[in-house]
Image (cartoon, rainbow, N blue to C red):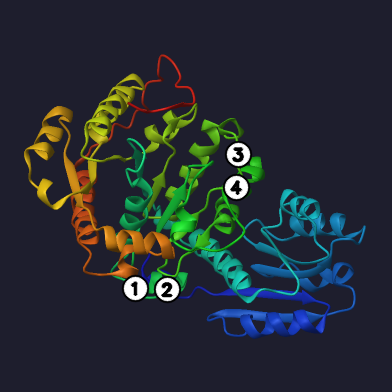
Amino acid sequence: MFSKSDMKGKSNSLIAILESDQAHDEVKSVVGQLPKVATSIKQTKDTLGDAQELVNGSADVVIIEADLTNPKSSPIINQLCEYVSQSGFLIVLAKNATPATTRAMFKAGVNDVLTLPLDRSDFLISLESAFGSLLAKQNTGLQVKGKVITFMKCGGGAGSTTLATNFAHALISGASGKKSWKKLVSENVPRVAILDFDVQFGTVALGMSVEGRSSILDARRAEDRLDSSLLASSLRSHKSGLKVLASPDEIVPFTAFSSDFFEQILDISRSLFDYIIIDIPQAWTSWTHAILDQSDVIIPVLKPNVEHVHNTQKILIGLDHLKIDRNKTVLAVNHVAKGLVHSDRIAQIKKITERPLIQVREDHKTNNSARDRGMLLAEVSSNSVSLKDIVSGKDVIINHLNSLQRSSAPSAKADGDFYEEQVTG
């Protein structure tokens, strides 16, 4: 975990190369307020032609205004990507950008592309990603090894996404209000990310009202260039300090992703965060094994009914088939009615599955309000019984995580692969 002492002596530099007065004023109003960042704003009539001389290899973050319809923009920006060191971060402020030219910029190695006129919120998110990734690189000596906790659905309406997002928030709930990356570091709060791997119908970002353009597709399109900087630029920021890797806005085939891609995402995430919370689709795909195998704890989420208990047993058998230790699992029994708390049914679930469990009581009013407003439970009511159970359940899960002694050898490969089938009763 990062601490305030890790920031001592650390400083960063930023240079902006701009042409228009509007871009100059918009950039200056934001970067001039950055703490511990040496900023230099240059205004020139030929940003592309003067870029190399003005950058001079000295800046951690480079911002350049460019007209992407200009034929010479692509080769010059390609050169600039090579010129900015691997530890740097390049942001292009694009005039006349199209989806095609934007994709070309990312393919060339640009970390972020923002359109003009500049949206202040998007610019702040981009800068946060830039300096957050630089901070992570500066602290590589700390050998952060984050823990992966994966939530998976045992049937329709289980509430896996709700539990995943609110569990992630509970991990940093010692911090209140909006926290920048620097504030989170200074308060020694765990760095937590939630990754929405439900690539077709994921709603993590929607349920948290986390706005932005980036998604898991940005990381996917990076291919061999994917590293900590590019992943950081693909994350969105929640006001609590949580980082979110959103699912795509459009339907994407499961086959567009590979096991190697998800393993790479998790390897990089472990170096950046203390806890990585994953929400995976109910469908078992060709890459399900890679995610579950990399997980330190697996949380099947179920309702206290026959169908979901039956599906939970199928999941446990599936883990056996994949040769993944079912001892990594802790069940989360969600939507527990008041009369079922400590009831025989809960005891039977524990007996049948032979797994430890947490139970989360139903709170229709708070849950419905949070869902309709795109808010976390804590933002709606700190007295919610569901929230209280998630917070206490967090301690159970972390204690279980700490008690596990994972073998250093990788899991054996499964005899067969799961196909894209819905796990239903």
Q: Could you tell me residue 205's position as x and y percent?
A: 49, 57
What is the distance, in whole Å, between disc 2 and disc 4 at their CAs?
24 Å
Q: Secondary structure at mark 3?
A: loop
Tell me which label, 3 or 4, sits earlier in the chain: 4
The foreground one among 130 and 241 is 241
Q: Which residue is mark 1?
A: 187
Residue 112 location in percent, x, y? Answer: 67, 60
Q: Can you tell which quarter of the image residue 86 is in?
A: bottom right
Inspect this view and state whether residue 222 appears. yes
Quarter of the figure with residue 157: top left
**Residue at image coords 60%, 41%:** 251
Marks 1 and 3: which is nearer the front? 3
Which residue is identified by label 4?
219
Separation of marks 1 and 4 at Cα, in angstroms? 29 Å
Mark 3 lies on residue: 252
In front: label 1 or label 2 = 2
> Which label sits on residue 179?
2
Tell me which label, 1 or 3, sits earlier in the chain.
1
Kind of residue indicated by mark 4: Ala
As measured in the structure, the alpha-carbon distance from the residue carrying label 2 to the one carrying label 3 is 33 Å
- Write the residue at 53% across / 80% down: 36
Q: Amino acid at mark 1?
A: Glu
What residue is at 18 percent from the left and 29 percent from the top? 353
Task: Tell me which numbered mark, 2 or 4, is placed earlier along the sequence.
Answer: 2
Going from the N terminus, do you reach mark 1 or mark 2 first?
2
Q: Position of residue 300 (x, y in %)?
A: 29, 38
**Which of the pair 136/377 is nearer the observer?**
377
Contact between labelled residues 4 and 2, with CB atoms less than 8 Å apart? no
